[in-house]
Image: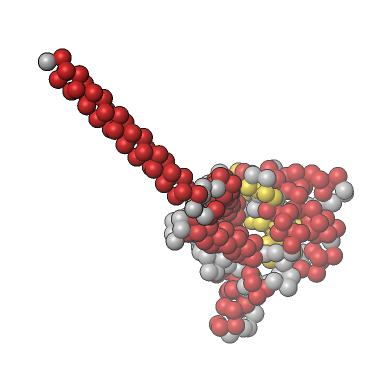
Amino acid sequence: MNFSLKTDSRELNIAYIVVVSLIFVLTLVTFSSMFVFNSELAPDDLPDDKNEQNEINYSAETAAKIHEYKQTIKLYDEMLSAPYLKLVNKQNPLEEGFVAEDLVQTITNPAVKLNSEAAAALQKFIEAAAQEGIVCTIVSGYRTYEDQESYYTETYQSNMNAGYSKETAENMTNLVVAKAGESEAETGLTVEIATRRGMTVEEMEASDLYKFAKENMYKYGFILRYPQGKESITEYNYSPFLFRYVGSTGDVNHAQYIYEKNLTLEEYTYYLANKKAEAKQSLDVLEEQASGK
């Protein structure tokens, strides 16, 4: 009985030792296989922390550039929609029923109204001119649609009375006076100045007022609206009398840029629209690249 028990115990111990030995061998083989597999990995198959970091930096840089383009587009949108940069001409008439707002009487000529900001800026210019001993008379400013219509008709009739044909009289009128709805006078942002009323173009050009205005009006937010040599762009004859208020957008002084680059309002607004389009195109390309398309 005791012998039988001892024999069973010895057999169990032997079986236990065999099982443990097998487990040890299998474990050793498994670890050896893993070591061999890992050692066969090529360098390119291993994670590259440096490459991952570069990708993160590039993504951040791209995001920053996208933000920059969006801000640029927003700025150009603000400038192009700014009321003081509103382009009014034969190709860009005022919307039907347009009525200028925020009009005030000018101090030196209460009979003439202008946009309040333009009027304040003009008054500063007049005071600066006076300090130089230069007289500045405000000849005209804001006109209603009806006023502009009457002004156009009167000019046309005057040309007809001078003996010109209907077609010639109309062509002549269209070079000096805008039709109602196509005139910047209806915005209250354009002013006609002179030393005195009734001056000819030649007299105004030779005056100290014109010389001073041409060199200094931009400091007060005004530009010469119809400069010489730009008739094909503005579609109106050169006029040394007419100045247009364009103001500023944030830190951007529109009048100074237009003055320094010798631009018309048409050229400037086209420039802004073109720069916006370039920024939009660059943004589209960058966003497409970033999305992996």
The residue nearer to you, when weighing 144 against 254, is 254
Q: Residue at x 56, y 44 (%)?
A: 49
Report x, y in % for residue 143.
57, 56
Q: Tell me which colouring the rendered structure shows.
A: secondary structure
Horizontal arrangement in the rendering, residue 5 relative to residue 187 (left or right): left
Quadrant, the N terminus: top left
Up/down of 277 relative to 21, above or below: below
Report x, y in % for residue 210.
80, 59
Residue 186 seen by the camera: no
Q: Residue at x 46, y 58 (%)?
A: 292
Q: Residue at x 34, y 40 (%)?
A: 26
Across the whole image, how many numbered discs are drawn on residues?
Answer: 0
Horizontal arrangement in the rendering, residue 149 relative to residue 97 (left or right): right
Up/down of 149 relative to 14, above or below: below
The residue nearer to you, when weighing 205 against 138, is 205
Quadrant, the C terminus: bottom left
Q: Residue furthest bottom?
A: 165
Quarter of image, res 139: bottom right
Q: Residue at x 58, y 85 (%)?
A: 165
Up/down of 97 relative to 131, above or below: below
The residue nearer to you, when weighing 125 against 156, is 125
Report x, y in % for residue 201.
76, 68
Horizontal arrangement in the rendering, residue 23 relative to residue 116 (left or right): left
Report x, y in % for residue 123.
73, 44
